[in-house]
Image (spheres, grey):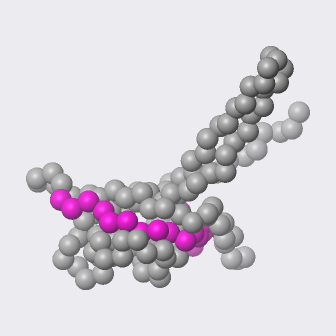
Amino acid sequence: MAAPIAVKPIVLRDIIVSLDGKRFERAVSSAAFTPSASTVTWQGGTPDSTFTDVSPATWTCGLTFAQDWVTPGSLALYLHANEGKTVPGIFAPQNGIGPTFTADIVITAGAIGGAIGAVPEGTVTLGCQGKPQIVPAPAA
């Protein structure tokens, strides 16, 4: 039996979130690329003729962000103005450490407004064209 693989969990606290070369991490409180795949099962006419496979995953990029409708170039304004466009996206879970992840992202607009007495947040699920690519960290 093989030895257990060591693990180094990370804490998201100094990230990079870039859409079309614009950096938005100061407005983002949550960022994640998420796959979605379906299990497909086919049952033949005998108990031992069951076949299972998985469909290719489709990917999305989820962002939760503070709504800022005043600052020129804010994420809220960017998403609203660029709905439907496909742009290059970059997510680095640890700025300057470890890999980054890149994908072509399809923009959708976020929410407008929220609860009284609180910072209004928007949550968007942006489409990805294909699977995000892992870009290894530069050698030290």
The residue lying furthest to the top in this view is 47
- x and y percentages locating residue 104 in the rendered image: 55, 71
34 on left or right of 26? right
Q: Is residue 11 above or below residue 99?
A: above
**Residue 76 falls in image quadrant:** bottom left
Count of marks, rendered view: 0
**Residue 10 falls in image quadrant:** bottom right
- x and y percentages locating residue 113 in the rendered image: 18, 59
Q: Nearer the viewer, residue 81 or 44?
A: 44
| Quarter occupied by the C terminus | bottom right
* Span colored in magenta: 92-113
Q: Nearer the viewer, residue 11 or 116?
A: 116
Q: Is residue 2 magenta?
A: no
- x and y percentages locating residue 65 in the rendered image: 32, 62
Residue displayed at 83% across by 39% down = 3
Residue displayed at 62% across by 51% down = 57
| Quarter occupied by the N terminus | top right
Q: Is residue 93 visible?
A: yes
Residue displayed at 74% across by 25% down = 43
Q: Nearer the viewer, residue 76 or 14?
A: 76
Residue displayed at 40% across by 71% down = 84
The residue lying furthest to the front in this view is 45
The residue lying furthest to the left in this view is 116
Q: Nearer the viewer, residue 84 or 65?
A: 84
Is the stretch drawn in magenta largely helix, strand or loop? Answer: loop
Q: Is residue 95 magenta?
A: yes
60 on left or right of 138? left
134 on left or right of 119? right
Q: Is residue 8 above or below residue 90?
A: above
Q: Is residue 119 visible?
A: no
- x and y percentages locating residue 9 in the rendered image: 59, 50
122 on left or right of 44? left
